[in-house]
Image: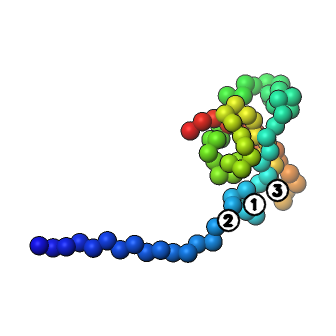
Amino acid sequence: MLCMGVFILAIKKNIVLVPNHAYVPKHEIMTKKEAEDVLQKFNCNATELPLIFVTDPAIVGLGVKPGDMIKITRKSGTSGESLYYRYVVET
């Protein structure tokens, strides 16, 4: 009878919180007023924005809930800063 062994290899990893990582842009929860202004500016509904899951590692620590809007500020070498908006949904 052939016996198959199972090997478990434990590797020590450096744990880095995603929101504090150098390559993760700044994520902020928008107020209801800010969200309404953005939706009017772009003439769209919140559900027409790109979606982001409430479990996304970049926003887990913000205390977001489904229905919130997130403003993402990315630094760019050509335009300085770019703003992106995401609508928070459940997974």
Which residue is found at the position 81% from the left and 49% from the top? 73
Which residue is found at the position 19% from the left and 73% from the top? 3
Residue 77, position as x, y percentages in the image: 84, 59
Secondary structure of the residue carrying tag 1 is: helix
What's the mark number on residue 57? none
Q: Amino acid at mark 2?
A: Val
Pointer 1: what residue? 20
Q: Amino acid at mark 1?
A: Asn
Which residue is found at the position 75% from the left and 60% from the top? 20
Q: Earlier in the sequence, mark 1 or mark 3?
A: 1
**Which of the two residues, 37 or 58, is positioned nearer the viewer here?**
58
**Which of the two residues, 1 or 29, is positioned nearer the viewer here?**
1
Residue 60's place in the image compared with 11, above or below, is above
Pointer 2: what residue? 16
Which residue is found at the position 69% from the left and 61% from the top? 17
Mark 2: few/some/many CA within 10 Å (<14, 14-19, 20+): few
Q: Amino acid at mark 3?
A: Ser
Secondary structure of the residue carrying tag 2 is: loop
Mark 3: few/some/many CA within 10 Å (<14, 14-19, 20+): few
Q: State how far apart marks 1 and 2 are (Cα).
A: 7 Å
Looking at the image, residue 75 sits to the left or right of residue 19; the answer is right
Q: Earlier in the sequence, mark 2 or mark 3?
A: 2
Residue 73's place in the image compared with 87, above or below, is below
For the C terminus, which image quadrant? top right
For the N terminus, which image quadrant? bottom left
Labels 1 and 2 touching (C-beta < 8 A): yes
Q: State how far apart marks 1 and 3 are (Cα).
A: 18 Å
Residue 82, position as x, y percentages in the image: 82, 48
